[in-house]
Amino acid sequence: MESDTRLEQSLSELKLKIKEHDKLGPYSEILDDPFLKVFLQGKGFDVDVALSYIAKYMHMRTVKYKKQMSPYLPSKARLLETEFSQMLRNKDQHGRYIAVLNTYVWNPEMASVQESIAAVLFALDEGMRRYFSHKPDGVVVIIDCKDTTLSKIRAVTSSEIIQTMDLFFKCLPASPKEIHYVNENIMYRGFLNTLLSFFGKKMRGRVHIHSSNMESLHKFVAPNILPKSLGGTLTNEEAYDSDLINGARENDKFYKGIWPQLWRRVIRASQSHHTTTCLPSTGIVPEMPPWAPKAAHIIHENFIMNGAIRILKYLLSKKLRERIHVHSKKLDSLHEHVSRTILPTSLGGTLTNEEAFDNGLMVKIRGNDGFYKSLEKKSDEVSSMR
């Protein structure tokens, strides 16, 4: 077929460009044909665009989130022994594959957030090779949020939310055609609605929140291909494709190739020679400054920002939560903490901006170009040594 010929020609060209690529070249023997074909299919055989997405994919896994991801291998991932991340055996009425994420299986006491992200990535990577290397049929995602507790929500930091967005939406060759949430409670639903407000219109239109209304879900995905846990007619054994997880668990070689053992030892050695305040933060508040604000006051936030702040506070420790005060338009509430006699009129105070603000600070900041240029130069030197 013409499309098969075009795919093979594009594949040959892509593999040659990868070998010549300064960042991807060292991984040219690790990036297998089925993996590369997914990016070509997803990007309409445009070799240069596919190459750019492969570069993003590898950067996310081998540089930006290497510290978080490299401790895990699929053969050891405990969540792959469960029904946490699955693919249905049958396609939907539009010929699309159906991925199912059963978040209720996850328990932060059994597996960390990072391990759960890794488990989904292992299943995702195998799914791309297995289902999408020949035909870009598209995928629909169903996320079962049953039994979402406050302890589970608080186990996830904002940096891990950003990491998830980066890994699943910013470096893959295609996005899900639909995302369906079911069995979410009111707390999780509020979080979703707030999160969706930051998405583009196109992506928001693909997200459907059904709560416990399975009939609503069945308008999109027929019950005769779903397991009983999703209001379907099949057992889990009949509904899920066990070959996906079995295949994922055999992919250790790929991840050992992109996360070399030697590099892990270098990371651990470098960490042991620095104080914890110098290590990269995976928490919601940066760890580098030697101090944290004694109080943070937020005013004039709209209802979307108010909801986002209240949800994100759940992710903080009790000590930090107590330091954050949300006042909306109630400036009298702010003045219970900060006297209006030292505030500008824009904050309900008695002073003009010139009287209230220290303009000398901005002057000093503008004079710090040399520091940041030298910092950038040193960062480039360190990066070139890796």
Image (cartoon, grey):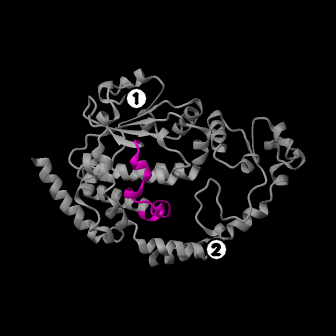
Separation of marks 2 and 1 at Cα, in angstroms:
57 Å
Q: In the rendered image, which residue does mark 1 sit on?
A: 230
Residue 71 among magenta residues? yes
Check disc 1 and give the amino acid type: Leu
Q: In the rendered image, which residue does mark 2 sit on?
A: 371
Residues 160 and 155: in front is 155
- Mark 2: which secondary structure? helix
Check disc 2 and give the amino acid type: Phe
Query: Which residue lies most toward the right here?
Result: 341
Q: Position of residue 152 (x, y in %)?
A: 57, 43
Task: Give the main secondary structure, helix, strand or loop, of the magenta stretch.
Answer: helix
Please, is residue 26 above or below residue 92 in the view? below
Residue under the image location 78 percent in, 43 percent down: 346
Q: Is residue 172 visible?
A: no
The mark that comes first in sequence, 2 or 1, is: 1
Query: Which residue lies most toward the left here?
Result: 1
Residue 70 among magenta residues? yes
Please, is residue 258 above or below residue 297 in the view? below
| Disc nearest the viewer among 2 and 1 | 1
Q: Is residue 385 visible?
A: yes
Answer left or right for 146 relative to 253.
Answer: right
- What is the number of the mark on residue 354? none
Please, is residue 14 above or below residue 40 in the view? below
Residues 200 and 77: in front is 77
Residue under the image location 55 percent in, 77 percent down: 378
Q: Quadrant of residue 59?
A: bottom left
Q: Position of residue 242 (x, y in %)?
A: 30, 43
- Mark 1: which secondary structure? helix
Q: Which residues are magenta?
A: 62-83
